[in-house]
Amino acid sequence: MVTEGVVDIDGTEHKVENNTWIVGDDDEVIVIDPARDAEKIMEQVGEREVLAVICTAGLPDHVGAAIEVASRDEGVVALHPKDKPLWRETWSETWPDIDMEDDGIFEVADVQLDVMETPGVTPGGVSLYCEGLGAVFTGEALQADGPGKLGGEYPALADQLTSIGGRLFTLPHDTRVLAAHGDEVTIGDLEPHFDDWVSGSLTRADTGGEDDPLPDGTKVSGIKLNPDDD
């Protein structure tokens, strides 16, 4: 389901639409990234038990309704510990219940959600791979138009591309990419663009100055293809 709202990033307001994903069956669910509008989310949940709320990032538009959604059924809230400082910007007097770690597992309705650390947009960003559904919930890390941004910028693009190439693009090509924003695509739709992203296409500016990317783009992306490169 989609909710809409405004997020303040460094004093600038950005209008955003957020995907909140509900995974489960007729009896129980896990809610991923409850951005806002807990009432609307709980209407979709209905009478099913909320086992857990999983936040793929600590940003306001991932955690804004987390406490309200989890509280009805005393469900737990899960977040990567590196995003706790971001969490406190929204929830100043409480903490998540579970510190997620790489390769952690959540189970609901006979399927398994595997935690994959995919930092970049935030230091504690995670994705959740569900082999049983043939889907990966990528949060901010990877979206239909490529790597996700924060306020129109890439906070740590080298880390993000490492996460994408080393983790997400190892999944089967027909895996559905279900992100925090935008439409659904597949890993196979996006993987062919990876070399262009590494070569600097995401941040290249036609300025014609000294800081132009190297031929392999590494000056822009921050990635060293050879450890001895300056």
Image (cartoon, helix red, strand yellow):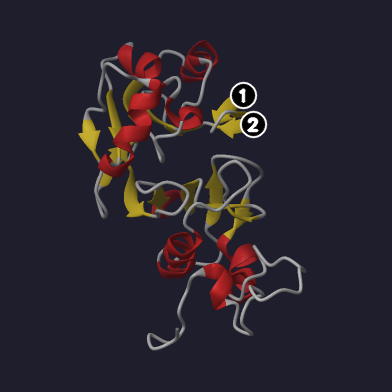
Q: Could you tell me the amino acid type at mark 2?
A: Val
Q: Which of 113 and 17 is in front in this view?
A: 17
Q: Is residue 208 visible?
A: yes
- Residue 43: image location, x then y, percent: 52, 13
Q: Name the image quarter holding the N terminus.
A: top right
- Identify which residue is drawn at 61% across, 76% down: 199
- What is the quadrant of residue 70 in the picture? top left
Q: Residue at x 54, y 33 (%)?
A: 10
Query: Which mark is drawn over residue 36?
Result: none
The C terminus, quarter of image = bottom left
Q: Residue 110 sits in which quadrant?
A: top left
- Tag 1: residue type? Val
Instruction: Residue 54: tell me if it is visible.
Output: no
Q: Where is residue 54 in the image (x, y as percent from the top left)?
A: 36, 34
The x, y position of residue 203, in whole percent, is 65, 63
The residue lying at 64 percent from left, 31 percent from top is: 16
Give the mark nearest the N terminus, 1 or 2: 1
Residue situated in front as seen by the camera: 30 or 65: 65
| SS assignment at label 1 | strand
Q: Do the residues under discs 1 and 2 have CB atoms within 8 angstroms?
A: yes
Residue 16's disc number: 2
Which residue carries the number 1 mark? 6
Question: In 3D space, how far apart are the residues under numbered discs 1 and 2 (Cα atoms)?
Answer: 6 Å
